[in-house]
Image: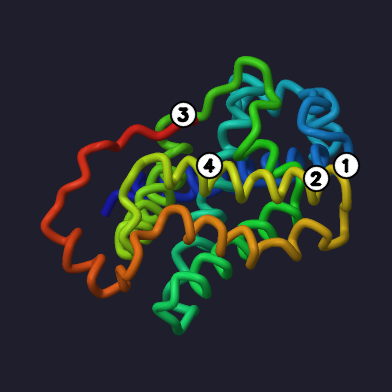
Amino acid sequence: MSKAPAVNEWREARRQSARDAIVDAAWALVREEGLAALTLRDLAKKARITTPTVYAYFDSKHAIYDAMFGQAAAEFADMTSQLESTVDSDDPQVLFAQSMRRFVDFCTSDVARYQLLFQRTIPGFEPSAESYAPAVRTLEATRARFARHGMTDPKHIDMWTAMVTGVVDQQISNDPGGDRWARLIDDCVAMLLAYCQPTGVSAKQAKRRTTSKTTTDKGVRK
């Protein structure tokens, strides 16, 4: 039997391990110095390799940002997917408040990750379709959660994203490490539901009403 497949697998695993180590070093660097401060020379020093070695695995600094974005988006998708399996309630106030609380905790616990995922801090950088795919899945899951509670207008999602990122921005900018804006989560959700949720529509009623519909709008704002 040829040993070529095994050798190729070993080489690919070694290459992936090297790429992961560079990405880990990049995260460590941007958490210390900020996203815009990333340079390949400093990254090579942080990873204890040469700059040409970095180029052997990534053809540009944006390629490194893309790998970082894909990793962060996957972490965000994993966090979001666990929500409804761990929140034992059909009450939208409970569900959406927990969703916002987890989002705020996720973002404030790693400011560099939040900035890369949700703010345009890197001039000219756009994530690849592959790296952005987890974010698309997360947005679709959010739309489905809203629909189950009778909220199907696209502006409802826009209001939600504006509200949750607004809480995060204020918390990071004006009370880092505190909870001045995080304490407003329950009130924010109550206001959102009072405006968006149809009067008297329960989660089960909303589900029956929306299961026969097919969502065709798959556009996602990057």
Residue 157 percent coordinates (x, y): 44, 46
Q: Do the residues labelled 1 and 2 touch (CB within 8 Å)?
A: yes
Residue 104 percent coordinates (x, y): 67, 57
Q: How far apart are marks 1 and 3 (CA)?
A: 25 Å
Q: Name the residue under label 4.
A: 70
Q: Is residue 24 left or right of residue 190?
A: right
Q: Distance between the residues labelled 4 and 2?
A: 16 Å
Of the numbered discs in the image, which one, if any, rests on residue 128?
A: 3
Of the numbered discs in the image, which one, if any, rests on residue 52?
A: none
The numbered mark, 1 or 3, whose residue comes first in the sequence reads: 1
Give the quadrant of the N terminus.
bottom left
Q: Name the residue under label 2.
A: 28
The numbered mark, 4 or 2, whose residue comes first in the sequence reads: 2
Element under disc 4 = helix
Q: Name the residue under label 1.
A: 32
Q: Which residue is drawn at 61% across and 38% down?
A: 118
Q: What residue type is labelled 4?
A: Gly
Q: Would you call the spot at circle 4 few (<14 residues within 10 Å), some (14-19), or many (20 or more)?
A: many
Q: Residue at x 74, y 38 (%)?
A: 26
The outermost residue toward the bottom is 88
Q: What residue type is labelled 2?
A: Ala
Quarter of the view holding residue 189: bottom right
Element under disc 2 = helix
Q: Would you call the spot at circle 2 few (<14 residues within 10 Å), some (14-19), or many (20 or more)?
A: some
Q: Nearer the viewer, mark 3 or mark 2?
A: 3
Residue 125 percent coordinates (x, y): 60, 21
